[in-house]
Image: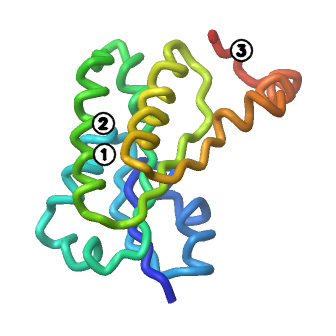
Amino acid sequence: MKNIVLLGGSNSVMVNGLQKGLKEYANVTNLALGATTSIQNLYELYRPRNQEAIQSADLIVTESNINELDHHLDSNCKLPLDIIFKNMQYLYMSLYNIKKPVCTLILPRFVQNYRIIHNMHRLLANYFGFNIIDMSSNYEQENIIEFGKRFGGTNYPL
């Protein structure tokens, strides 16, 4: 059975979410922590107790775009875009240096500046040759956003 390391926020932490689906096909080491950005993913890569799992991984899955958006827009935090991008660069460079297959998951969240942050992830994933599962683009291309709004979903400022 394959080994997968999962880095991310609450979407990766939810018991019946992403990790449940992955556990049907692989051994999953979940290093995710809710409400955290790529800087937490970076920390988990270097944390001594995680080294065995990372070195034995057949795949590393990372997701943090939603939390980057939330931290950027949070009135208490207001994490600037340049800091978000710098943190992402450190993460992606470190993932590349591990020499393991990486998959970046870009989840849908359509709030102010979402295109900028999603494009940062796309740029870095493409630059380092990582795989991308881009649910955000899929939602846009298939007009799923509009479908959700018809049933009382939030009118997201694009």
Q: Residue at x 22, y 79 (%)?
A: 52
Question: In the picture, residue 17 is in which quadrant?
Answer: bottom right
Q: How far apart are labels 3 and 1 at the CA level?
A: 32 Å
**Callout 2 touching callout 1 (CB < 8 Å):** yes
Front in this rendered view, residue 3 or 157: 3
* Amino acid type of the residue tagged 1 in the rendering: Tyr
Image height of 77 relative to 45, above or below? above
Front in this rendered view, residue 96 or 81: 96
Q: Disc 1 marks which residue?
A: 92
Element type where label 1 sits in the image:
helix
Q: Residues within 10 Å of mark 2 (few under 14, many from 20)?
A: many
- Mark 2 or 3, closer to the camera: 2
Q: Residues within 10 Å of mark 1 (few under 14, many from 20)?
A: many
* Amino acid type of the residue tagged 3 in the rendering: Asn
- As drawn, the label of residue 88 is 2
Left or right: where does residue 79 sit relative to residue 14? left
Left or right: where does residue 149 sit relative to residue 60? right
Image height of 131 relative to 37, above or below? below
Q: Disc 3 marks which residue?
A: 155
